[in-house]
Amino acid sequence: MTGYRASFDATVTFANGGGLTAQGFRVDVPSPDIGEAGIAALFVASLGLLMTESVELGNVEIVAEPHKGTRGGPSDAAGGPPRRAGTLAELSHVIRAGMITYPGQPGPEITPHLTREASRAQYSPGTEFLIGRISLVGNTGTYLDSPYHRYPSGADLAAMPLERTADLPAVVVRVMGTRQRGIDVGALAALDVRGAAVLLHTGDDARFGSPAYAEDAHFLTEAGAAWLAGHKAALVGIDAVNIDDIADRRRPAHSLLLAAGIPVVEHLTGLEQLPPAGAWFTAAPLRIEGFGTIPVRAFARLPG
């Protein structure tokens, strides 16, 4: 396969003062029809230059020549950031205008604040933007409850540490097909949950968005919540309408978990993609002060 390199002179000026000149410099290029802007970008990347203000090229010539591995170039085997093994699994519902998440709560209103058409008057010809506005209750879609959701002295969303919501080892508790709605200590006791995101896989998410979603739903029992809090789980999630039995107005699972500083993620989906252990879970909320619950983009990195 034929490779190409660009030969050129360069004059660089820096935004913080000073400059640099080079004569007869060469970089690997992906094709012979690359423009000067592309060559200049490769030149800057190859030297790791910072705060460049301008790059002027002269005596540009494209030559057929094997690549030598220019840093950041087309044959740089080490180029790009390191990547963690494993694919990502989506675990959150799409938020759409008017959707109903929890019975009795209003659906989100999604409207334009500035339309593309109206924005054209503010920018150069051919340039347009959309600035959207969204009004929703925090309990919309897949969302995270912080301790402040239950307790006025609890940590709000802005105070939630990333160690509780991001890159957590996931422990999946599968209760699909069981006759018991309540997830009790017996389903948990054999698991090592310390520092983990404990994800309760009930299969109820198949009914999300329909009235049946709230009927005969699975939930975490009071004893189960106490066991998870006592065994230092980092986060607890469920793919059902509520982590509590919605008929129990005491909300014991919320009360016990949030009192222990354990955030709760409700309305997950797609937990069948995860193995019982080995995945890494993230559901980091926006940092909003004085707010207890907010939708999250929940996902997991699968092992290997």
Image: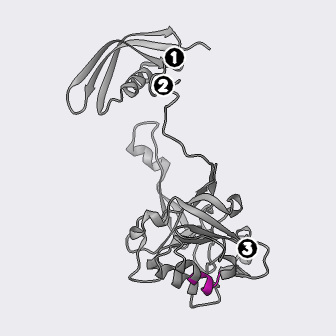
Position of 239 relative to 47 (above/below): below
Element assignment for label 1? loop
Give the quarter of the image for residue 53: top left
Left or right relative to 253: residue 8: left
In magenta, the rendered stretch is: 220-226
What distance separates the C-alpha of mark 1 from that of mark 3?
56 Å
Element assignment for label 2? loop
Using a 10 Å C-alpha cutoff, classify the residue at mark 1 as few (fewer than 14 neighbours), some (14 to 19) or many (20 or more): some
**Residue 175 tag number:** 3
Disc 1 + disc 2, Cβ < 8 Å: yes
Element assignment for label 3? loop
Q: Is residue 188 magenta?
A: no
**Which residue in the protein does label 2 denote?**
73
In the image, what residue type sits under mark 1?
His
Dominant secondary structure of the residues highlighted in magenta in the image? helix
Query: What x and y, as percent, mark residue 300?
Result: 60, 57
**Residue 67 tag number:** 1
Query: What x and y, as percent, mark residue 97?
Result: 59, 64
Q: Earlier in the sequence, mark 1 or mark 2?
A: 1
Q: Choose mark 3 or mark 2, whichever is in front.
A: 3
Residue at image point 43% right, 48% down: 119
In the image, what residue type sits under mark 3?
Val
